[in-house]
Amino acid sequence: MSFHSSRCLSRAFFWLVSLLLASLIWFISVHLSDREDGRLQYGLLMFGAAVSVLLQEAFRFAYFKLLKKADEGLVTISEDGRSPISIKQMAYVSGLSFGIISGVFSVINILADSIGPGTVGIHGDSPHYFITSAFLTMALVFLHTFWGTIFFDACEKGRYWTLALVVISHLVTSGLTFLNPCYEASLIPIFIITFSMGVWAFFTAGGSLRSIVTCLSWNSGSCFSGGNRGSPPSNSQHPSQSTVPSGYAGGRKLTK
């Protein structure tokens, strides 16, 4: 458990470094530009988001290389010559930790604003700001987990077109958030991307339609058997609790 926790913390650190560098680039570009030009500042904000995505994916690749080096070292010192963790497990832990830290930073300011003293929608804005932000954060956590699985598998097998698709889908997802507060135009496409990436990550991790059918059939069988498949009937008695015929006690017949 501590092994996976340390990897989660290290992956979160990589994401924080990428966020720091992206924020630094955006901060410098804003101060070097005309701060009175609204359209220019909006364009710089989009530029900062794109740079942030590219840096995140670059650090994801760097983390993969670091894990591969560490994995090779673990193989050399292990007794059986095998790694204690597979590439699929590394991808899942990496993607999940990336998604969690990304979700925390996405929603922490929103939660702070929800305390007040302002009221959402008082000037005619959408009152669904908080619930929409929660759904977007959930989608981002799932997406980073799926991206991590697909990205690591593509790096392992040298599928560069897959890496490009992951980066493009990340850029598109980030760009769709600029359509807010038109939440229908951003939330629906993002969840379509999330579902598509989830299906792709499922088959990349070794899943199949047969495994889904097997899982569903096993669960349905468990439900019909009361949760314990193959368990004995509830009215069966333990041998030590068998009834003793009347007139007998301790294996001897009682006499009047």
Image (tube, rainbow, N blue to C red):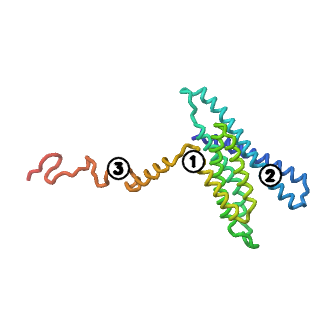
Determine which residue is flagged by label 2.
48
Determine which residue is flagged by label 3.
231
What kind of element bears circle 2? helix
Amino acid carrying label 1: it is Phe
Residue at 65% in and 51% down: 143
On screen, 124 above or below 175?
Answer: below
Question: Which mark is first along the chain, 1 or 2?
Answer: 2
On screen, 245 above or below 80?
Answer: below
Question: Which mark is first along the chain, 3 or 2?
Answer: 2
Residue at 64% in and 57% down: 192
Tag nearer the camera, 1 or 3: 1
Amino acid carrying label 2: it is Gly
**Between residues 248 and 230, which one lies in front from this camera angle?**
230
Determine which residue is flagged by label 1.
202
Quadrant holding the N terminus: top right
Q: For residue 4, which quarter of the picture?
A: top right
Residue at 65% in and 64% down: 131
Crowding at dot 2, Cα within 10 Å, few <14 / some 14-19 / many 20+, comes out as: many
Mark pair 2, 3: CA separation: 59 Å
**Between residues 213 and 11, which one lies in front from this camera angle?**
213
What kind of element bears circle 1? helix
